[in-house]
Image: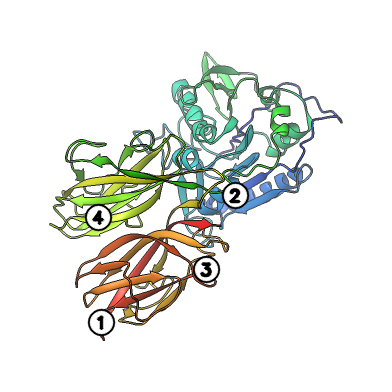
Amino acid sequence: MRRAVLALLLLFAFGGLAVPTAGAAAATADPKIVLIVGATGSVTANYRADMDAVATTAAKYSANVTKIYSPYATWATVKSAIQGANLVVYMGHGNGFPSPYNSILMPDRVDGFGLNAVAGQGDSNTTYFGEEYIAGQVRLAPNAVVLLSHLCYASGNSEPGNPEPSLSVAKQRLDNFAAGFAAAGASAVIADGHDNPSYYVDALFSTHQPIVQLWTADPWSAKHIFSFASARTPGFTAMADPTNYTGGVYTGFYRSYVGEPGVTTDDFTSAAEPFTPDAAGSTYHALDPVRLLDTRSGNGLSGAFSANAARTFQVAGRGGVPAGAVAVTGNLTVTQQTGAGYLFLGPVPTSAPTSSTLNFPTGDNRANGVTVALGAGGTLSATYASSAGRTAHVVFDVTGYFTPDAAGSTYHALDPVRLLDTRSGNGLSGAFSANAARTFQVAGRGGVPAGAVAVTGNLTVTQQTGAGYLFLGPVPTSAPTSSTLNFPTGDNRANGVTVALGAGGTLSATYASSAGRTAHVVFDVTGYFTP
């Protein structure tokens, strides 16, 4: 776990002499302010108290203030809350790069948030959600500001007790930490290990000046400021203000700024209008099938997948999928696999996925329909989960895409979430008996809202004692006349589905087989539709 040290990351820099004025620009609507306290062990209670003080300051300028504190600060909750936010303040662990822990930049886990892995399980179950999550899954309001407080690495600093970074390492750290937030739409990022976030909140809403001036004039400034062009966010300027400068050597990297030149507090307040990104969800556009991945021929990626190693391939800009697409539908196929296992397909690369897209044995070509969110830069990532040393070829044909607009069916992509696993008692407990319908709750779980009318997802059967099929639909029936997933005995099978929700936001499933047979059933939700 990365230990925290004072470091405020603010998506707008404040410096120079503040110019408070009664006539300061006023937003025409309450700006959206989100305050986040991550899982930081024994110091979390202190951070909650500190953030409550920030909330009091923020309440002077907006009635739209949301607090998300550990132990309930999960990625799903934070991601939903910060969409369209004008101001984000985060206190918690910082996990950056370069660091003693990683030899390469790992965008899925560095330069972002340290949040609760599971809600309600204390303040020490920390999971890192890096720049790839933020850049690929978050859209902030225009000219947004993000304040990250009490972070290691964010301002270029090291963890307490570790050696001071070189100038080169400090510059990389602060530039890297800002990149994901800038890609999500922020106009500036500040890391400050000295001052209270309330100073910045007050200055943003009550003065007329360039935001970088607010940062340079902060009372804690050591006046050792230097600047350089951001390498991670072209067009942005990066700045640092180390505490000490002795014998030509900088130490104490506790204040930094990365931002768009010229952005002002007036830009920030004028953008604080009602802003709902992609409010209409996404409209679906069908395509004739186009092959975007075939590792046998080197299309998309070359060479078979090795077990437990995530690989990423480009989707947007190919096969008719535009750059603005947020999700796609398609067909995923495995072939020539040398070991049983499963494929995971999703927006974020992971070598140890917690949900499956396509399960298969050895020597059996399998395919599955999918609807899946695109990751950063319009990519998809796949993992072949199997025993070490095994290989498999993978094929993906795209059949359509979703874009955020106001017409047609509105779809909302989600990271995969397991809503039913009868093996563990998730959703329903105990195996299905043949020819007996069972109903489980979907709406209100895993990011699916109460108003959803249909969902997409992945249906899996396992440990079945007899051949047959599963039916999944909105109305329970013990004698279904259609099938969703067909299978033999002793073979885990899965298939992608798009299915209407029943009364109260439920789904009903039936295992159709010979009397006395049983089967366990799993369902992972990947998105939902709203009218």
Q: Earlier in the sequence, mark 4 or mark 3?
A: 4
Inter-mark Cα distance, 1 to 2 = 45 Å
Which of the 4 quarters of the picture holds residue 196?
A: top right
| Marker disc for residue 367 | 4
- The residue depicted at 31 percent of the width and 38 percent of the height is 313
For badge 1, the amino acid type reads: Arg
Q: Which residue is mark 2?
A: 81
- The residue beneath circle 1 is 517
Label 3 vs 1, first from the N-terminus: 3
The amino acid marked with disc number 3 is Gly
Label disc, if present, on residue 505 of the rendered structure:
3
Q: Is residue 167 above or below residue 35?
A: above
Q: Residue furthest right?
A: 22
Question: Residue, x 43% and y 38% (percent of image)?
Answer: 376
Q: Position of residue 491 (x, y in %)?
A: 20, 67
Badge 1 element? loop
**Sequence-first disc among 1 and 2:** 2
